[in-house]
Image (tube, rainbow, N blue to C red):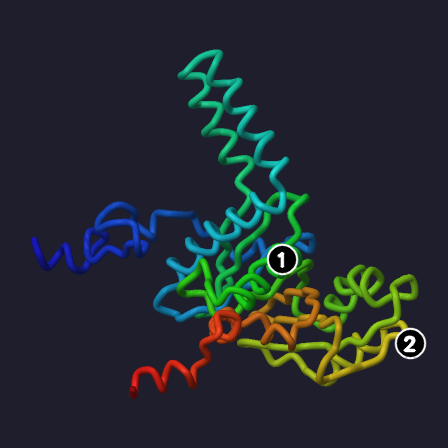
Amino acid sequence: RDRKRGRGGGGKRQYLPGRGSGQINANQKHKTHSMERLRNPKIKGVLVSCDVRFESLCASECIMAFTEYAQMRYPDLFSKEEQGGAAAAAVDVEAAIAAEAAKEKEERHFQSVNTGVKGLVFIEFTHTQMSPLDLCSDVVKQVKATGHTKTKYAVRMTPVLASSYASIDNISKAVEPLLSEYLGAGAEATSYSIVFKKRSNDLNRVELIDKVAGMVDKKHKVDLTTPKICLLVDVLTNNCLLGIAYDYFGLRKFNIQELAGIGIKETDKKEGGGEGERVKAKEG
C-alpha cells in the first residue's frame, strides 16, 4: 500500500507556503491550459521564469499576486463583480451558488497556460480591461522600491501583448500593431531596443531583428544600453510571444529577485543604516 501511495497520485503532496500543513494542494489550485492557446494572436499575459521544480507553485502564487495588484489598479471592476454576487445571493441561496460558480468559470481573470518549456509558466489575462504591461510594471516597481515581493518562486516577469507562430513572416505581421502604437510615426520620438530570446527553436536571430527594426519609424533611435522602450521577443518552440516594456534595463530586465535586493539596500539607506554600518555593529 505504501509503495503504491508513493508512486501514484496519492504520493507526496505540495503545499503553498505559509498556509498551514494540508490546507491547500498546489497542484489542484489551478488548471493549466494547453499550449495551443499561445497561438491565439490576441492573447495577453505575463511570461514568468522559475525553477523547474516549482512551476505549479510559481503559477499559483503569480495568479494570487496579479489578482491583488489588479484589485488595486482596477477597483471598479472588482467592486461591480462583488455587487452582482451579493444581489444574486439575496434572491436564492442555491441559485446564487450556481450562478457564482458559472460566473467564476467564465470571468476568471487569470489562468495558467502550458508553455512547453521547462522553467517557464504563462499567466493569461482573460479580461480585456487589464493590461499586462501596467500590472507587470506595478509589480517590479514596488519590489524595487520596498525590497518586498509577493512571490517566492518567480524570477523574471515578461509582459506579453501579442503572439504568433514562430516564423519571420508571421512574427512580422503580429508585431506590426505594437510597432504602430509604440514605435510608429504617430508615437513620440524615443529610444528603443529589441530583446530577443529563443528556446528550443533555430530561428535566425539576426535576420529577425533586422526585419523588425526595419519596420520601426526612423525617428526612433536604437539604444542598446539605456533604451526607454524595449520590444520583447520570446520564441518558445513553435510559438512567439511579443511584448513591450519601459525602462527594461533600469528595472533589471524585470528580474524580481534582483530588484528585491536593490529595494532592501534602498530601504536601509532611507533608515540611515547601510550595510557597512550593520557589519560594524555586528563586529562591535
Query: Where is residue 24 shown, x and y percent of the image?
Result: 29, 47
Check disc 2 and give the amino acid type. Lys
Q: Which residue is mark 2?
A: 218
Q: Residue furthest left?
A: 1
Numbered badge on residue 39: 1
N-term-proximal mark, 2 vs 1: 1
Is residue 110 or residue 259 the one in the foreground?
259
Is residue 129 or residue 115 the one in the foreground?
129
Query: In the rendered view, would you say 55 is above or below 228?
Result: above
Is residue 205 or residue 19 the one in the foreground?
19
What kind of element bears circle 2? loop
Q: Is residue 220 left or right of residue 58?
A: right
Query: In the rendered view, would you say 245 is above or below 100?
Result: below
Query: Where is residue 52 shown, x and y percent of the image?
Result: 39, 70
Q: Is residue 251 left or right of residue 186?
A: left
- Residue at image x 91%, y 62%? 186
Query: In the rendered view, would you say 275 is above or below 146?
Result: below
- Residue at image x 66%, y 58%? 133
Check disc 1 and give the amino acid type. Arg
Query: In the rendered view, would you say 168 is above or below 107?
Result: below
Proximity of marks 2 and 1: CB atoms separated by less than 8 Å: no
